[in-house]
Amino acid sequence: MSLHTPLCDLLNIKYPIIQAGMGWDKEGLTTPPALVAAVSNAGGLGCIGGSSIRPEVIRERIRAVRQLTDKPFGVDITLPKMEDVRIPDPDEVHKEIQEKFPKHAKFNEEKVPILIIGLGDTAEVVPLAHERGIKVMALAGAVKHALSHARKGADVIIAQGYEAGGHTGTIGNFPLIPQIVDAVRPKPVVAAGGISDGRGVAAALALGAVGVWCGTTFLVTREGGINPIYKKQILNGSSEDFVRTAYTSGHFARHYRSDVIKAWMSSGLEAMPTPYQGNAMDEVRRAAETANRVDLLHVPGGQVAGMLSEERNNVPAREIVERMVSEAAQILNDMRSRYVGS
């Protein structure tokens, strides 16, 4: 069965299924080129997670993906908030800007078809992208954020509900998606958070979205590059095991509730601004991985983890995309025949 929405025409993809550009590790293993290309080759849209990796690595990943697919794909980045932190030495400020911001221009140099803004102000990025024919998608966890992105010219708004893994807001998808759809109409809206199968896709379409943005479900695929420890946390964890905390990046994000997350949440400490909190805590993560301290490791993931079991472990990404499409199409057809009268 097929599933076609206006998003497919806008992004030049076959199916309205997008693999979230998860980029929480500096090594860029969360969304390796093999995963990005597999989703795009299956008819969806694969995305490189570029928020934590260095500029030269982003360029390498873009070129690696292009070796594996001729289909559209995207790069997901976050925009650092530098003005909140005082650094006394102007030379340090200049050096940091040179180190932090160039990676956000690599999509421009490499002419990536689609740019996704996970966090930050899109005002300056959108015109730059549009000048080069690059479409921009922006995540929003509330109507005010969606309206801001829409006013600044984002082509697609990703409505990310409370259920989602990684950076997320406080509003669940059922009230959030319709509100954002109504607020930014006629701009297309993609639903994110809690979606792992065709039921979620069908529900998102019923709420007014024209596609879905899925992260956690692709982390455990064959092509997913995360540590097996993290896959185990997702496959064995319950929805309650994934909690929102500012520990990992300075912004609230949903992660597996490890012992170190529990300790942080009970400490009363305030997180440093982005990107400082993330840089500092990433050192803890890497040390814990090296020491194999499972109790200190915490994968970013959504409440949908409660729906994922060992049966989903190492399933090819293509199969996940095709399964979601066929299930959603079947559900929509069944609902029409069962519940819609003449």
Image (cartoon, grey):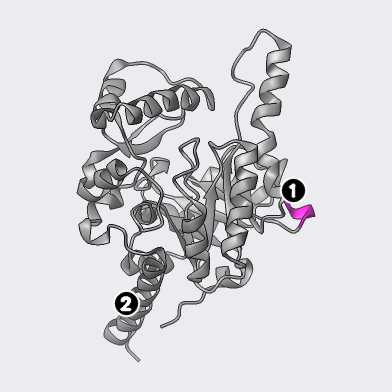
Majority secondary structure of magenta residues = helix
Between 294 and 119, the one nearer to me in the picture: 294
Q: Residues within 10 Å of mark 1 (few under 14, many from 20)?
A: few
**From the viewer's perspective, is 179 left or right of 185?**
left
In what element is the residue under mark 2? helix
Is residue 130 shown in magenta?
A: yes
Q: What residue is shown at x 59% (from left), y 37% (from top)?
A: 120
Q: Is residue 9 above or below residue 37?
A: below
**Which residue, given by chain and number where applicable, does mark 1 sit on?**
109
**Which residue, given by chain and number where applicable, does mark 2 sit on?**
331
In what element is the residue under mark 1? helix
Q: Where's residue 311, x and y in %?
A: 22, 61
How many angstroms separate mark 1 from mark 2 (CA)? 42 Å
Q: Residue furthest top?
A: 88
Q: Residue furthest bottom?
A: 342
Quadrant in the picture for the C terminus: bottom left
The span picked out in magenta is: 126-132
> Which amino acid is tagged 2?
Ile
Q: Where's residue 290, x and y in %?
A: 35, 28
Q: Where's residue 142, x and y in %?
A: 48, 45
Q: Is residue 145 above or below residue 311?
A: above
Q: Residues within 10 Å of mark 2 (few under 14, many from 20)?
A: some
Is residue 108 shown in magenta?
A: no
Q: Where's residue 118, x and y in %?
A: 54, 43
Q: Which mark is residue 59?
A: none
Q: What residue is shown at x 74% (from left), y 48% (from top)?
A: 109
Between 318 and 86, the one nearer to me in the picture: 318
Going from the N terminus, do you reach mark 1 or mark 2 first? 1
Q: Is residue 268 above or below residue 169?
A: above
